[in-house]
Amino acid sequence: MFLKLIILIIVAGAIYRFFGGKIPLIDREEKSEVEKDFGNNIEGTSKCAYCGVYMTEEDALIYHRKAYCSNECVENYKKRK
């Protein structure tokens, strides 16, 4: 009985795949090199937590897990508290 169940599952899976079905854990599509590099080539932007100016993530100053555009904004944030 158990052997018949296993054979039935294998046959059903083969038929499913034959007609274009994809099994989620087995049929993972690999990303092309262009898709892999796409996120790395574009500079991310962040919004200053104090004044709202947008800047690149590379230029952002991080203070208490928030991004700031300048030391002046960081100091103003500290004074406000």
Image (cartoon, rainbow, N blue to C red):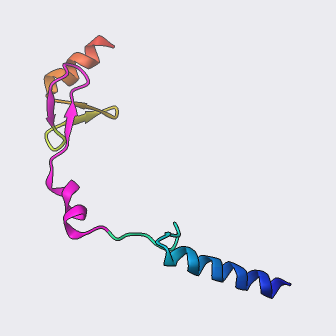
Residue 30 percent location from the top left of the image:
34, 71
Q: Residue at x 21, y 69 (%)?
A: 33
Q: Kindly identify the residue that appears in the image at 19 percent across and 41 percent down.
A: 57
Q: Which residues are magenta?
A: 31-55
Most distant residue in the top direction: 80
Asked if 81 appears above or below 68 in the picture, the reply is: above
Position of the N terminus by quadrant:
bottom right
Residue 28 in the image: state x and y as whole percent.
43, 70
Quadrant of the image occupied by residue 56? top left
Judge whether residue 24 is colored magenta: no
The quarter of the picture where the C terminus appears is top left
Q: Nearer the viewer, residue 73 or 23?
A: 23
| Along the line of sight, the residue nearer the viewer: 42 or 13 | 13
Looking at the image, how many numbered discs can be counted on the residues? 0
Residue 39: in magenta span: yes
In this rendering, the answer to whether 50 lies above or below 14 is above
